Image: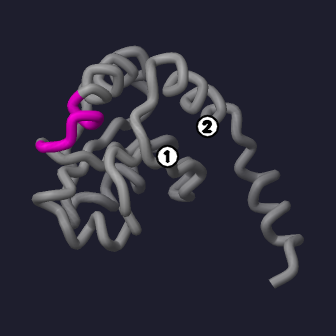
Amino acid sequence: MATIDVTEQSFAKPLENSEIVFVDFWAAWCGPCRMFAPTYGKAAERHPDITFAKVDTEAEQALAAAANITAIPTLMAFKDKTLVFSQPGALNATGLEEVIQEVKKLDMDKLRADAAQQPA
């Protein structure tokens, strides 16, 4: 599956329709973003069960601000509509694959139970 471009208006749709969603926040002028793009695209092809979205931070400044993006590229991962990973910086193919596998293995019921037991 290819990557999809999302906007402020369409951002919620992949979260509603997919169990796992990765989001790459990037900009055309960003060298590390351009270097990460092919790695991200290849991961999307290898994992058709995951939605790989891209947000152009120049075109979608309000969305980037709402997501607290302070450096690009920033990669976020959502599982069951919950943010489970967020990290600035470009990952190499091995690093990205490790994150993908960790997100796939996450037990969301256990994560929610653990979070519910944390003091407020």
Question: Overall secondary structure of the magenta stretch?
Answer: helix
Q: Residue lying at the far bottom in this picture: please name it.
A: 120
Q: In the image, is residue 30 part of the stretch drawn in magenta?
A: yes
Image: 44 above or below 32 = above
Query: Residue 109's x, y, as percent?
Result: 76, 53
Q: Amino acid at mark 1?
A: Ala
Q: How far across and down, in percent of the image, does residue 117 sit?
A: 88, 71
Q: Are marks 1 and 2 in contact (CB under 8 Å)?
A: yes
| Residue at 61% in and 37% down | 103
Q: Which mark is residue 69?
A: none
Residue at the image point whose x is 37% and y is 37% from the top: 51
Q: Compared with residue 72, is residue 93 higher up or lower down, i.e. above or below?
A: above
Q: Look at mark 1 in the image and give the residue it sits on.
A: 77
Residue depicted at x 33% and y 61%: 12
Which residue occupies the foreground of this view, 50 or 88? 88
Which residue in the protein does label 2 denote? 103
The magenta segment is: 29-34
Asked whether 120 falls inside the magenta stretch, the response is no
Front residue of 89/9: it is 89
Q: Earlier in the sequence, mark 1 or mark 2?
A: 1
Q: Quadrant of the C terminus?
A: bottom right
Q: Position of residue 89 (x, y in %)?
A: 42, 41
Q: Residue at x 22, y 59 (%)?
A: 10
In the picture, the quarter occupied by the N terminus is top left
Q: Left of 97 or right of it: where is 12?
A: left
Few, some or many residues within 10 Å of mark 2 (<14, 14–19, 20+): some
Residue 81, relative to residue 48: is it above or below?
A: below
Element carrying mark 2 = helix
